[in-house]
Image (cartoon, rainbow, N blue to C red):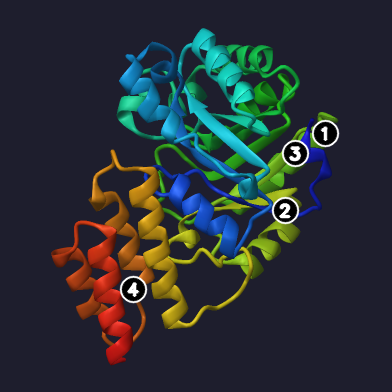
Amino acid sequence: MNFWEKLEKPFFMLAPLADVTDPAFRRIVAKYGKPSVIYTEFVSADGLLLADEKGKEILKKDLLYTESERPIVAQFFTGKPVNMEGAVKLAVELGFDGVDINMGCPDRSVEKQGAGAGLIKDSRRAKEIIKSAKRGAGGLPVSVKTRIGYNKNEIEEWLPELLSEEPATIVLHARTRKEMSKVPAHWEVIKRAVKIRDELKSGTLIVGNGDAADLVHAKKLAEESGADGVMLGRAIFGNPWLFSGEIPSIEEKLKVMVEHTKLFEELLPHKNFAVMKKHYKAYVNGFDGAKELRNRLFEETSNATEVENIIGEYLKSS
């Protein structure tokens, strides 16, 4: 059942990005540039278990996936071990290939729940949450995504605590919570993390995350650090072809943007259309007339039909 063991190294993964790697965009990425592993956006374990029926159904929409996305990992956050166990049981029922615990999100509201990056300051609770996830997983592999520390690099103390619970994989964002994404990622710390893992004779895979610009760069980072894999995040914006290495034409890019918009409207009708619009800045960029076209998309559209019409006009006139 552990798909991680079958991956050819180094492998390359799509990061979970809130309001970005939703079911619509994941389908597009799987179609045009499939990574080794895909993660869902992070989903509240507390909400999945404690919200009213309408709230639960909305959260479950974030967990929609297709067979084309496998291996697909559901990512959850909570500060409560019992709720993590319940959410993981749901992921098993839904047929996910793995589950991941978010221990890196710097959002204050998430931290106030004792979740996300807040768990770096509470290794006892973090370990309890891993244990509870494993209880709910029934053999499904459990991974952890975290940072190298809270206010400073704490990899020497933090990583062994996590490794003691034997997660299948640990994804390390190579920055502290304090640094957010404001400084270059510390890939030398990923190299040290691999050594710590090896010194402890752990079977856990180590994946580095932070600043990988494309697949060529990710391969270089993996080689230099010794990481088993690299997770790419921001580089996916406007570029579902990222993991294939293909460079699409402007026409291809715009047509896929329309396809993406239609999927967003179909799968996530409850979400504000502004969530989709943030992709347009990345899709519509770097060519003559891009700024004007982008402005039209921001100012004149509120649904997929309007987007399709504007793109159709542009392609006919260009």
**Up-down: is 282 above or below 112?**
below
Name the residue type under label 2.
Answer: Phe
Q: Residue furthest right?
A: 201
Disc 3 versus disc 1: distance between alpha carbons? 13 Å
Q: Which circle's residue, 1 or 2, is located before the other in the chain?
A: 2
Disc 4 versus disc 3: distance between alpha carbons? 37 Å
Number of residues whose C-alpha sits closer than 10 Å to that of mark 4, classed few (under 14), some (14–19) or many (20 or more): many
Left or right for 100, reference 41: right
Name the residue type under label 1.
Answer: Glu
Q: Report helix, strand or loop for mark 1.
A: helix
User: Where does label 2 land, which residue?
Assistant: 11
| Res. 123 image quadrant | top right
> Given this view, does label 1 or label 2 mark the residue nearer the observer?
2
Quarter occupied by the N terminus:
top right
Q: Which circle's residue, 3 or 1, is located before the other in the chain?
A: 1
> Given this view, does label 2 or label 4 mark the residue nearer the observer?
4
User: Where does label 3 land, which residue?
Assistant: 205
Disc 1 versus disc 2: distance between alpha carbons? 22 Å
Quarter occupied by the C terminus:
bottom left
| Res. 46 image quadrant | top left
Residue in the picture at 68% in, 43% down: 71
Number of residues whose C-alpha sits closer than 10 Å to that of mark 3, classed few (under 14), some (14–19) or many (20 or more): many
Image x and y of residue 282, in percent? 36, 67
Name the residue type under label 3.
Answer: Leu
Disc 2 versus disc 3: distance between alpha carbons? 11 Å
Name the residue type under label 4.
Answer: Val
User: Where does label 4 land, which residue?
Assistant: 284
Residue in the picture at 39% in, 25% down: 57
Q: Nearer the viewer, residue 138 or 260?
A: 260
Q: Which circle's residue, 4 or 3, is located before the other in the chain?
A: 3
Q: Report helix, strand or loop for mark 3.
A: strand
Residue 199 - label: 1
